Amino acid sequence: MANLTRKPFSTKTKKIEWMLASGRNPYDNSGKLCFVKTSKCRECKRPLTWGDRTYDFDHKDNNPANTSQTNCYLVCKVCHGKYTVVKKRRIKGWFGETVGHETIKKKVGYKKPKKKPKKTRKVAIRGFFGEVVGYRTVKIRKRKTGKKTKRKTKKRKSR
Ligand SMILES: [Zn+2]
């Protein structure tokens, strides 16, 4: 068998991913693990119900031995199938006859979350005579635009 190294995610890992996929905080204020029976597919946002077998916990990096929390990815069966391409390869025998088939799983890859626009700008580096020598990127710092500054009133010591 090809999937000898396949390890299932722990129930705790699954439940945390389940909660995160639904947009909920898996932990309450006291740090206790919460659980709600409904969640959503990470890809198509289809509603899912715990235990109804319409979903999978996919190994994000395609490494079945990596059962870390960050590698756990909740998707419905439709999306799992869509993003994992299964190919069948014929196993040839000595005389070219078909001995059997082996399945090859290939991950196509999920949509990557949109990256935030970079908060950098290019600043020209000028040489001795004011000519542009090159450019360097500078991080743009956001300044609070509020003109009014709250003055802290010092409390008078009351006797
Ligand atoms: Zn889906």
Image: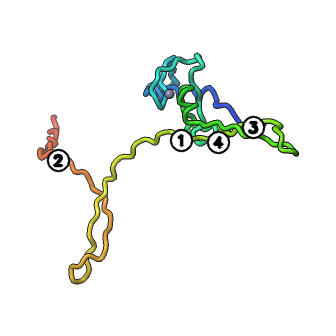
What crowding class fits label 2: few (fewer than 14 Cα within 10 Å), some (14-19), or many (20 or more)? few
Cα–Cα gap, marks 4 and 2: 48 Å
From the viewer's perspective, is 19 left or right of 149? right
Quadrant housing residue 51: top right
Q: Is residue 145 above or below residue 44?
A: below
Please, what secondary structure does the residue beneath circle 4 have? loop
- Counting from the top left corner in percent of width and height, residue 36 is at 49, 18
Q: Which of the marked residues, 1 or 2, is nearer the chain's N terminus?
A: 1
* Tag nearer the camera, 2 or 3: 3
The residue labelled by disc 2 is 145
Q: Residue furthest bottom?
A: 129
| Of 78 and 32, the residue lying toward us | 78
At horizontal 33% and vertical 49% (from top left) the residue drawn is: 117
Check contact, mark 2 vs mark 3: CB within 8 A: no
Residue type at mark 4: give it.
Asn
* Tag nearer the camera, 1 or 2: 1
The residue labelled by disc 1 is 109
Check contact, mark 4 vs mark 2: CB within 8 A: no
The residue labelled by disc 4 is 63
At horizontal 56% and vertical 41% (from top left) the residue drawn is: 108
* Tag nearer the camera, 1 or 3: 3
Please, what secondary structure does the residue beneath circle 1 have? loop
Answer yes or no: is residue 30 visible: no
The residue labelled by disc 3 is 102
From the viewer's perspective, is 155 left or right of 41? left
What crowding class fits label 4: few (fewer than 14 Cα within 10 Å), some (14-19), or many (20 or more)? few
